[in-house]
Image (tube, rainbow, N blue to C red):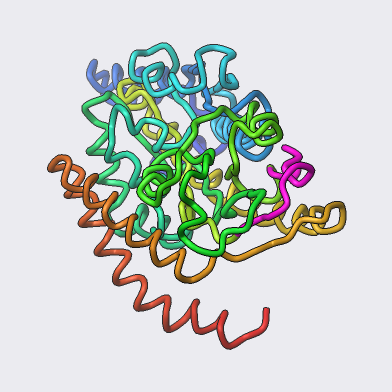
Amino acid sequence: MNRKTFFKGLALGTISLPFIMRSCGGDPTAQSNLQSANTASSKKYKWKMVTTWPPNFSVLGEGAKLFSDWVKKMSAGRLEIEVYGGGELVPALDCFDAVRNNVADCASGAAYYWAGKVPAAQFFASIPFGMNAQQLNSWLYCGGGLELWEELYAPYNLIPMPGGNTGVQMGGWFNKEITEVADLEGLKMRMPGLGGKVLAKAGGTAVLLPGGELYTGLERGIIDATEWIGPYHDYKMGFHQIAKYYYTPGWHEPGTALELIFNKKKFEALPEDLQEIVRCAAERLNQWVLNEFDAQNAKYLELLKQESQLEIRSFPDDVMQELKKYTSEVIDDLANSDAMSRKIYDSYNSFKTKGKAWADLTERAYYEKVSI
């Protein structure tokens, strides 16, 4: 058989694997490699994904399901991922440990949920007065951020990937006006993470309540205010029925990145093509979540305006300036807590500073000069 006939037969699928193996000159190593490659390409993997979101939770839980579907389709069924909502397999906030300890293979959540274990992880979710979704994605994918994230998680046997972004969130629901910084003193507000620490510096009290208790907490006065995400989820929670003022902007979460985390050993045991399929599906999810939030928030903002008497207010400039000052103090404390935190923050802040100069000439100028 000549070379031309061989490749024609190969393309038409008429040359069998035994023939190819014989064509390798009977080399045991070559035959073994071909057999291994064929076995690896047909091997099937079944994974478990745990999430911090309630089962089938809008956008976030839906996104996890979509990710699973995309991976299955792109891999022709070779990698199947069964998704569990928070509490179905492990408690919602145990996802980090579940994946690192082989209870699950991967998870969907947000890096600031693990602040008690890995304080520097908060830089990979959102920090007050930090970068928005577009800038954060640029830092992660093209500015060295993802490499630092991987370095941070490596000791925990985890590989992180961006898994969505909420975009700029709303500033929260209040039953009294915020006209000056003094109005924050004594305020009991549901606000997790670094935003809660900034609120505390302003004299308020950050209260940690699970999502399912926010409505009754606000209704009964257990809290005076709450932040959640944006109009889509806020409408579904019914906050417009019990709170009068809806404040903007979400200074505490200007573009919150979500994450997918994978057991490092399990991920690296996948064939290279499946690893790339997972990475591609993660990038697709990252974009879909942001797009879906923008689409749904625009729709539900109109519904909030139509169905309630809420008043949308902007935080006064002097309040924002004071909160920004307190944020600098909180971030400095975090950045100085250990060498890795300092390394990550220096990279984050350098990228943010350069990005601001570019955004001032483009994004900011566009919004200021052009009526959208």
Between 314 and 40, the one nearer to me in the picture = 314
In the drawing, does residue 60 fall left or right of residue 162?
right
Residue at the far bottom in the pictured view: 369
Q: Is residue 364 above or below residue 48?
A: below
Q: Residue at x 79, y 53 (%)?
A: 304
Between 27 and 109, the one nearer to me in the picture = 109
Residue 68 appears in the picture as rendered? yes
Residue 235 image point, x, y percent: 75, 44
So how many labels did they put on this image?
A: 0
Residue 191 image point, x, y percent: 49, 41
Which quarter of the rendered picture does the N terminus lie within? Answer: top left
**Magenta segment boundaries in residue numbering:** 234-247
Q: Does 235 appear in magenta?
A: yes
Q: Residue at x 41, y 16 (%)?
A: 98
Residue 161 image point, x, y percent: 40, 40
Q: Residue at x 31, y 25 (%)?
A: 264
Q: Does 60 appear in magenta?
A: no
Residue 34 appears in the picture as rendered? no
Q: Residue at x 55, y 61 (%)?
A: 249
In the drawing, does residue 26 fall left or right of residue 133?
left
Residue 95 image point, x, y percent: 44, 22
